[in-house]
Image (cartoon, helix red, strand yellow):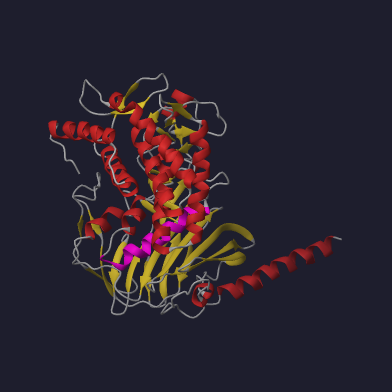
Amino acid sequence: MRGKKKKIYEWKWLRIAMMALLVAVPLQAWTNPVFANQGESVQQESAWRPIFPPSVTVVEDFATTHAYSHFSEVKTAWTLYRQSAKIGSLSITTSTLPSGTFYYFLRYESLSKGEPVVVTLPFALEAFSYRTIAYPDPKSPNYLTSTWSEPKEAQLHTTLPKEPVFADDSTRSLILGYVDVYEKQPNEVRKERYDLAKGIHLTPTGIELSLSPVPGTISETWGFVGTKPLISWSTPQMVDLRMGDFYRVRKWTREGLLLPTPSTYSPSSQTSFWLNPYNAVGEKFLRTSGSTFFEDFALISLYAPLSWQNSHGYWFTSPKSMWLSKEYGIDRYFFDTRFNTDTAMFLLNGYKKYQDPLLLASVERYAQYFSKHAMTKHFATKNGGYLVEDYAHEAKPKAKTHVSLNHQLSEMNFLYELYKTTANEEYLALAEKLRQGVVDTAPAWENKKTGDLHYAYLVDGTYGLTDYPLLTLKDLRYSQRLLESIYGAREPQFDLLIQVKEAYLRKNGMPLY
């Protein structure tokens, strides 16, 4: 029996080695991606594979294709072995976008100690010039004070710096991220390990990526490779591109934007990041023209949240808010109405532009969840209006929370926009409930001591907390534009709130926009 088991074991690893050999054979280098017609996958996408080192054997776990209205997305995953020991798992997601730009995202999760895994992404390169984002104070990065570096030359057989590079060669335009490394923390928070990060190494056959061998770490890298210029350097919209950063201020991951974890969240540190449901950069780029990359990134951003919208229809906030926990007993993985509503509005605007039913279906799943939330978790006003609570948690269905004016307005605006798109009267009726809630309470939102608007209606029936300088004002102005488009008239009570806010800003020498 022992000899029979030994043969079975040897045969098992022989099969693994054979499969790995088939996968590891270098395939034809990716050169000129083809536009993906609706409903079709791109052959180069499905054939495009990283080249693994000879010391590593790989077993393909799965390969899936998602066909969207304007492009297809292919995700392939492998388990990696070294000398029969599992060392990690690697996946790569690729797409050819309507512009002809090729997009890739690679993620590697290390499971055991050892030598770094070096993989090659097989597209031919030549020497190119590139720029990076420079900050006057690297310890306090701010895109408003950032600048573009002077063009630098990158030769083959060199390693790029550990930051995103914006490059052009004689035939292509590239935006290449470096190999970012994270250490897993509780509540799906990641701690950046910049000490383990690596710049990509340029070779004639492709780019070499050195992936972290530290157990429990995640290595990620991504890139956009265009057949035409991705960036028009002379246009004024380049400040919007610097806003994206993808380096120190925020980071791109396959599911969306990673943002620094607030100090009120747990866990938190100066180098910790969390996945925010709302992609403010993608939303900004969706309505920005002037460079191909804006639309490329907006498209990728639109479909990223579809992969983690939960079965209820919303996107959770995974870290624990210490403030919400103390005030209302709400734990991690909670529902935040503002982040979610902004996400749904982004997807709705994407649907308006690209007419993909998948985007609208995601929006309506959220709208159905929010409608139930609004109907069951609100404070009623004197004329039948609703002030809808900002937060919820499935484990604490009876917990009551405050109502922020900006949350309330954004929810109402979303419902009006969805009504205009679908003509569903239920969305209009609920939007009117939220509108009535603000109208009924409008005078009480003014803080007589400061002259500003109160931030929130509190659980005890009072108003308080400090409002944002501009966010609520922007929401009020947007509300008035929507009401004029639907009813041909503005809401007088909203104008009173706008006047209060603008007067406060003027008094304190603050901008009105």
Point 18% across, 64% down: residue:
150
- In the rendered structure, does residue 292 fall within the stretch colored magenta? yes
Which secondary structure type mostly characterizes the magenta part of the structure? helix
Q: Residue furthest front?
A: 488
Q: Which residues are magenta?
A: 290-307
Report x, y in % for residue 346: 39, 52
Residue 332 in view here: no
Is 387 rendered above or below residue 87? above
Q: Quadrant of residue 157?
A: bottom left
**Closer-to-camera residue (284/179):** 284
Q: Position of residue 291 (x, y in %)?
A: 28, 66
Against 417, residue 430 (above or below) is above
| Residue at figure coordinates x 46%, y 70% from the top left | 120
Q: Is residue 394 visible?
A: yes
Q: Is residue 274 magenta?
A: no
Q: In screen coordinates, is 208 left or right of 110? A: left
Q: Nearer the viewer, residue 264 or 324?
A: 324
The C terminus - image quarter = top left
Q: Is residue 148 left or right of residue 178?
A: left
Seen in the image, is 114 located left or right of residue 248? right
The location of residue 211, given as percent across then percent down, is: 46, 59
- Outermost residue toward the right in this view: 1
- Hey, which quadrant is residue 295 in on the image? bottom left
